[in-house]
Amino acid sequence: MNKIQLALVIGLSFFFQQFTNGQTNQKVNFLQKVGVLDSLYSKSLNEYREIYVQLPADYKPDENIKYPVVFVLDGEVFLPTVNDVQNYYSGGFTPEMVIVGISNDKNRMRDLTTSKVTEMYGSPFKQENGEAANFTKFIETELIPFVEHNYPVTNFRTLIGHSYGGLFALYSLVHHPQLFSNYLVIDPSLDWDNQQLIKEAKAKVSSANYKGKSLFMSLGGVVYMQRSGMTLTEIKKDTTDFTLFSRSNIDFSEVLNQNKQNELAFEWKFYPRDLHGTISFPSIMDGLISVFEWYQTENIDKYNSPTTTADEIDKIVRYRQHKLETHFGYAVPPFPEFLLNMQGYMSMDMGQMERAKVNFELTIEYYPNSANAFDSMADYYEKNGDNENAIKFVTKAFEISGEDSYKERMEALNKG
């Protein structure tokens, strides 16, 4: 940094500090802090490894709910972006998830590259590299058990990686597909070791079984290092080192497209306006939506329509429950509690008592430990003049929560 730049930085810092003091005269507070720092010692790596963990916004420790988990390579860089995307898209497009950012600021090339090289582009290369197998051992035998023991996660896992991280993510897909269900691969460095991983993929993916797994893969706009404006068709025909990075990306995607019998849900996207350093932001947004396409709600217009019968409501909800269980591999509620509950009250307000009842029943079925679900059913019965059943359900709400408001309601209903 030269003296002019330094003076400018100092001047701007002084201006900002004076402006802040003038506005609040208090210590600056951040609007948002993302990711709680944690760490574990790895025998495989012979070092401590830091991780950053972000729990869902609606997480409540006393509810004992577990969530799918996203592992983000280079987590100190990309976890905030993943969290931002989740803040906008979770619920309707992606499930609520625990986000685990893995720090790779030290020994990044060692851990994320997939085979050993001693030279690169004709020159000697002495930096430690090619230890992806050992880093995989750390993830499988140490990190995943640590996260599962200490945080509310299930075994449904997504892996996100950029550049060398993307190379590692594809290495995991090819050689250790049991570890993750989803892969979000951003501008991966598949040129590594003269496309060695592509050669390995050709030998494996044709006979692999990727049913239920999803991969989103992206390519940035700098496809030729010395010239702009080349089309992807021209890039594929080029044989120089200047296009090896982008050609490798395209070559890997073609290997997958030629082996659709393995049932991998695969989407590839080109971002012509983005650089290697900017492509992560749109890729994380598009990628999470892509790999969780099956999660997105169907028949929502029919579910919301006042003309839909109670039987049809029941079928829509149970279809979604079955679909989610098929993909996750375990049972999960098909809709958030508030949505089922809200639909019950809306139906009751419109005098559609059968629809109201089925929504309240579904809420209790999928959220059996919710006092509010039982209290809502008590509202239904009270509305229909059935105090006996209203007392029965509000009593259950009181047994679950012990809240005085439910006890007082029981007493009032008994008097009535």
Image: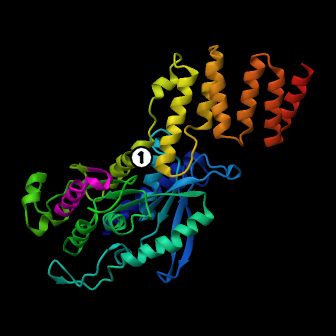
Q: Regarding mark 1 in the picture, which secondary structure is present there?
A: loop
**Percent x, y of residue 7:** 37, 63
In the image, 396 versus 11, the foreground residue is: 396
Magenta highlight on residue 263: yes
Q: In which quarter of the image is the N terminus?
A: bottom left
In the image, 307 versus 184, the foreground residue is: 307
- Residue at numbered disc 1: 292
**Percent x, y of residue 377:** 72, 28
Residue at the extreme top of the image, as rendered: 351
Residue at the extreme right of the image, as rendered: 415
Residue 129 seen anywhere in this rendered image of the structure: yes
In the image, 390 versus 5, the foreground residue is: 390
The residue range painted magenta reads: 247-268
Is 92 left, or right, of 210 in this rendering?
A: right
The quarter holding residue 339 reads top right
**Percent x, y of residue 237:** 7, 59
Is 167 left, or right, of 120 in this rendering?
A: right
Residue 107 seen anywhere in this rendered image of the structure: no
Q: Quadrant of the C terminus?
A: top right
